[in-house]
Image: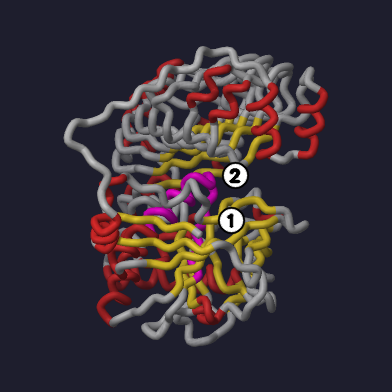
Amino acid sequence: MVWSEVLLAQSENRHEIILSGSKISNLINQSGLDTTLFSLVNLNYLNIHDTCLSALPDAIERLENLQTLVLHSNKLVKLTSKVAHLDKLKILDLSSNVLEVLPEQISNLTQLVTVNVSNNQLKTLPKFNVNSRLAVIDVSNNSLTSFPDVCYSEMVNLSELRCSNNNIVALPNTVGLLSGLKVLLVNSNEIKEIPAELAKCTKIKDLNLKDNPISDRRLLKLMSQGHTKKIIDYVKQHCVTTTSPAVETTKVRKGKRTPTEEEIEVLNDQLHKINIHHCSNDIKVVVQENVKNLRPHLMACLVLNITFTEETFKRFIQLQTKLHDTICEKRKVATIATHDAEKLSGGDLVYTALPPNDLRIKPLNGGGQELTGAQLFKKLQLEAENLRKEKKRNTYSGIHKYLDLLEGKPQYPCILNSTSEVISFPPITNSDLTKMTISTTSLFVEVTGGMSQAICKKVADTLIKEMLLLFGNLTVQQVKNVDVDGNLKSVYPSRTDLVFDDNSGILVVRE
């Protein structure tokens, strides 16, 4: 018997399908996964979660266009090696299962960007030495005794490595090869010594070494205080270096000379410029705890002194649509929202989550009518179905195609202004309160997502770069993210953001 969910996806030629809950568990108990699922070769997103699924059939290899495979919160005890045939796979989420081992063949997935195998029973991991696109690895809450085999100079994109709550006995000195590392969490392990090479990871912003049996008491005290920069400075000065320093050579090209000041000025005039201003105390985003299990990642900034024309306004809206369909993977990994900054009402913003009936918003282009989140969701569902029937199409269009990202959620993410009004309801819509117009001169830009900070930063960087090409020179002001106690969590753009190649034609000037 073909499952109704699979039959619907088949009839509408959908590119994504989500299967979860007790109904799906009952069907799996009766006869296993519906094999028709594996005939949907156009699928690029498959999500099976909160079921009794204990094994994934080998037929998974037929889904050759799959880019995202989410299998969290099931009963998986093993993973078929056939997953390694999914050559286009970028995101693999196997968290909260009962896996004890992963097939070595996973390391053949060279397009992987995110791997999440947290909350399992893993004792070993495959070797990730050819997966140079990997940006995020989460292996926390397992039974690992060795640090993940990822410390290679080719891993330039690896920015987040989460290894908390394992039995790891040593941090390798090769960790210094991870030049792009920004988040390293190895708390609650069995690590006794910290190699000085860790200080080579100069981009680290979030380092957690707590609850390890570190022999250095001064370092132990610094770790308990959690000041990343102080820890790195101490490691650099006092910990033991166990690798030989590389011999640096400088090649001098014949015929090269230092350009004059006049030549530099001419060159600078030919570049696109981004002027980055420090944070202002006038605005920051307070990230509350209740959104962290729902859609935890957010990057925000202000873009000042914008001048729209009818043409550039239209192209800017089209740009956001293009990025949502491409780098944001149809809003599955991130969502962009832009607001008229002068309509924010002043003061701090709050990123939180509210029950569908408590969230109240005046949706963008909704005629000023205020709706609850539940009412808006139901209204959009009805609109989508009527539109689909009217147009005689098999797929939804506009914001209607993102409704499945919120379906069944007990709470909805949202951003509140200083007067507790909802200005943003990701990944669905903004509020009319902060609607941009052709007269808008400053923008509040936010990127939210459920995968990682690294992905949100990449999306934000891409958006700013595209805006630069659209508007010419830009002035960008940093915005801080803080927790409810006012502790700094992140800032965008930091010195490690908006970094471009020398031949990009972009000059970044930082205060």
Q: Are marks 1 and 2 in contact (CB under 8 Å)?
A: yes
- What residue appears at the point 79 percent right and 17 percent down from the top-left corner? 215
- Pinpoint residue 344: horizontal percent, then vertical percent: 58, 77
Few, some or many C-alpha atoms within 10 Å of disc 1 (few <14, some 14-19, many ≥20)?
A: few
Which amino acid is tagged 1? Gly
Q: Nearer the viewer, residue 226 or 393?
A: 226
Residue beneath disc 2: 21
Q: Nearer the viewer, residue 274 or 381?
A: 274
- What residue appears at the point 30 percent right and 33 percent down from the top-left corner? 64
Q: Quadrant of the N terminus?
A: top left
- Pinpoint residue 174: horizontal percent, then vertical percent: 52, 19
Based on the displayed image, in which of its 4 quarters is residue 238 positioned? Answer: top right
Q: CA distance from mark 1 to mark 2?
A: 10 Å
Let me know if residue 187 appears in the view: yes
- Pinpoint residue 113: horizontal percent, then vertical percent: 43, 36
The colour scheme applied to this rendered structure is secondary structure
Which amino acid is tagged 2? Gly
- Pinpoint residue 462: horizontal percent, then vertical percent: 37, 54
Secondary-structure class at tag 1: loop
Query: Comparing marks 1 and 2, which lies closer to the viewer?
Result: 1
Above or below, comparing residue 79 to residue 445 in the picture: above
- Which is more N-terminal, label 2 or label 1? 2
The stretch drawn in magenta includes residue 98: no
Q: Nearer the viewer, residue 349 or 269?
A: 269
Residue range in magenta is: 444-463
Above or below, comparing residue 403 to residue 27 in the picture: below
Q: Nearer the viewer, residue 94 or 434?
A: 434
The disc at residue 153 is: none
Let me know if residue 71 appears in the view: no
Residue beneath disc 1: 408
Few, some or many C-alpha atoms within 10 Å of disc 2 (few <14, some 14-19, many ≥20)?
A: few
